[in-house]
Amino acid sequence: MNAGRTVFSQLIAYLSHNEFQKCVARYGGDRHHRSLSCWDQYLAMAFAQLTYRESLRDIEACLRSLGSKLYHMGFRSHVPRSTLADANETHDWRIFADFAQHLIRIARPLHVEDPIGLELDHTLYALDSTTIDWCLSLFPWAKFRQHKAAVKMHTLLDLRGSIPTFIRITDGKVHDVKVLDEIFPEAGAFYVMDRGYIDFERLYVFTLCSAFFVVRTKENVLLERRYSHPVDKSTGVGSDQTVILTAIESAKAYPETLRRVSFYDAETDKRLKFLTNNFVLPALTIAQIYKSRWQVELFFKWIKQHLRVYVLVAIVRKRLGLEASLYQILQILSLTLFERVPILQALQPPVSQNESGEDPNQLILFDF
């Protein structure tokens, strides 16, 4: 029964407290930080993200105003900003990284049937990075330029459900292609990447692992055409060729044939060329696979503008069978966290008069 429980406590109930405590124990998270447990820290930061809090002072003031409700929300102690600041600085970040991976393992199967906009039975990943500017005086370790700090968030996104499966935070100077060394290709899966990931020695690892890549090529990549295959140019596909690398170092790094597909994108008025190690799918599907990488750009934009408990909400959305988008759900949660109603009722849109079967033009004969 959800009677008397806030929406926040019902939402948090979708988290496994036992799994979280395993992560805490793994790194001794609560060993020397008894004033604020890792769990209370997690709840405080989840509350902050869901309710659009902008500072530690803001978090403290809002939590203090809730008074006795804190216990019913799952908190076991008050959260002064100084204590929260200390916890954020000293608690081992790997606790929360491991728990995020636990949530990802739950979320991915729930989204496995999500459409991706093209006919593809394989898992499709998009790999990309985004640069996040920071203050150099506060984060000197993240020096990016002479007077500027920045970090890069390298992300491998499962495009079914837009669930991140790998995230690596580095300083802003780390080149994108180096992250390929940390990716373990999944046999049969497709990986779509932009030009920044052109490194034939690293791309050859995907072929050796029986995984497929689709990557936009650069103009200075030296290739020799071996075969040309027929194409339907009305679809936008300009050519479909089997090629080999001709530069000595590149050919040594990737000794097998590649497939080059050229495509005219009428929406952007651009001509694009892709390289792939898949010779089975139609050329148009290869172009559509690359086009699907726009989802990772949307993910970065969404994260930067609306950083929230992303994976938790993705799980709840599927478990409750909600049609609303993640963004819409978060907007609703920000206003209903402290309501004492069943979470499904809080997150479902109200039934309009037309949907309820009532005629909006029907005159009211009796006013009770």
Image (cartoon, rainbow, N blue to C red):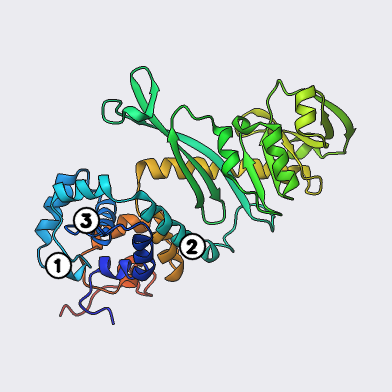
Q: Amino acid at mark 2?
A: Ala
Q: Going 67% across and 49% down the picture, which residue do you hit? A: 190
Relative to 298, 331 lies left or right = left
Q: Position of residue 283 (x, y in %)?
A: 77, 42
- Distance of mark 3 from mark 1, alpha carbons? 24 Å
Q: Determine crowd level at label 1: few under 14, some 14-19, many 20+ residues with C-alpha closer than 10 A.
A: some
Q: Position of residue 346 (x, y in %)?
A: 30, 68
Q: Determine crowd level at label 3: few under 14, some 14-19, many 20+ residues with C-alpha closer than 10 A.
A: some
Nearest to the eye among marks 2 and 3: give it: 3
Q: Earlier in the sequence, mark 3 or mark 1?
A: 3
Q: Going 20% across and 46% down the picture, which residue do you hit? A: 85
Residue 69 has which mark? 1
- Residue for badge 2: 107
Q: Amino acid at mark 3?
A: His
Quadrant of the image occupied by residue 3: bottom left
- Distance of mark 1 from mark 2, alpha carbons? 29 Å
Q: Position of residue 61 (x, y in %)?
A: 11, 51
- Location of the C terminus (image quadrant): bottom left
Q: Is residue 244 visible?
A: yes
Relative to 72, 227 lies left or right = right
Quadrant of the image occupied by residue 200: top right
- Residue for badge 3: 33
- Location of the N terminus (image quadrant): bottom left
Q: Amino acid at mark 1?
A: Lys
Q: Going 30% across and 25% down the picture, which residue do you hit? A: 136
